Amino acid sequence: MKILALIPARMGSSRFPGKPMAPILGKPMIGHVYERVSRSPLLALTAVATCDKEIYNYIESIGGVAVMTGSEHERASDRCAEALLKLEQANHARYDIVVMVQGDEPMTHPDMIAEAIQPLLDDPQVQIVNLLGTIQDAQEFEDRNCIKVVCDLHRNALYFSREPIPTRAKVAKVPMGKQVCIIPFRRDFLLEYTRMAPTPLEIVESVDMMRVLEHGMKVRMAPTRHSTQAVDTPEDLRKVERLMRGL
């Protein structure tokens, strides 16, 4: 298996403009993500996919690989598909699995790559996997920046939402799961994703994976034993910096 990791990143986040280059412990956030992902021994290559020269130039300055993509992409998965084809052409290579790692996951542990990929190695029918984290408290459960997920009995996703799901109305303790944005695709499925029409719930929830579910396909969820904190706001950035000081 030839495995490529792609980190989509752009400066134009509506909630936190310039987020990828925001410093954490003196280093831009995208630098932390790139270095941590690159430590996985399973990867043939790690690259950043971006439409911004500032990000591209920074990654090149630290000896990393970056790919310029178009600025029209609404979904990170579409940006990664463009970068995949450019890298395959440039490197005269064909990758079997593409692991998308969002550029706002600076606490990514290299072992999380292995956790996410394993279902693809175990079952040839699985086309896409998301890591599944545990929501720790009510504040995170209510946070719209935290993407909640509910699963079937075979650990396939039933639905992703920014709203609190499942309901807590009937019982005191419910399973509260969240999407951790380390998402491996089989190569051809990533390209197929870009050919699928965007879907109503994908748009209203602003979650890439809803396009897969609405087209009648499955997303396998893989639990992670690692705790992470994505950065969606300046407050998240300060929280992550405090957490990383203790790592």
Image (cartoon, grey):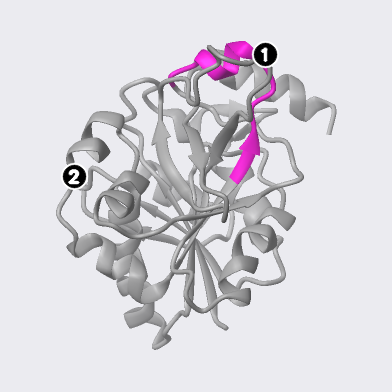
Where on the picture, by quarter, is residue 245?
top right
Q: Tell me which amino acid carries mark 2.
A: Thr
- Residue 193, given in percent of the width and then of the height, sits at 27, 62
Q: Is residue 171 above or below residue 118?
A: above
Between disc 1 and disc 2, whose residue precedes? 1
**In front: mark 1 or mark 2?**
1
Image position of 126 (left or right of 83) = right
At mark 2, the secondary structure is loop
Disc 1 to disc 2, C-alpha distance: 34 Å
Bounds of the magenta segment = 132-144
Residue 82 versus residue 137 in the image, above or below: below
User: Where residue 10 sits in the image (x, y, percent)?
Assistant: 36, 40
Q: Is residue 196 left or right of residue 94?
A: left
Q: Give how far across and how far down residue 221 sits, in percent.
A: 55, 52
Quadrant containing the C terminus in the rendered view: top right
In the rendered image, residue 183 lying in the magenta stretch gets the answer: no
Which residue sits at x=42%, y=84%? 94
Q: Is residue 141 magenta?
A: yes
Q: Nearer the viewer, residue 129 or 81?
A: 129
Question: Residue placed at 67% from the left, 48% from the top?
Answer: 223
Residue in the picture at 67% in, 38% down: 107
Provide the residue designation for mark 1. Answer: 172
**Quadrant into which the N terminus falls:** bottom right
Question: Where is residue 77, by image quadrant?
Answer: bottom left
The residue indicated by pointer 2 is 199
Q: x%, y% of residue 114?
A: 68, 63
Nearer to me, 239 or 135: 135
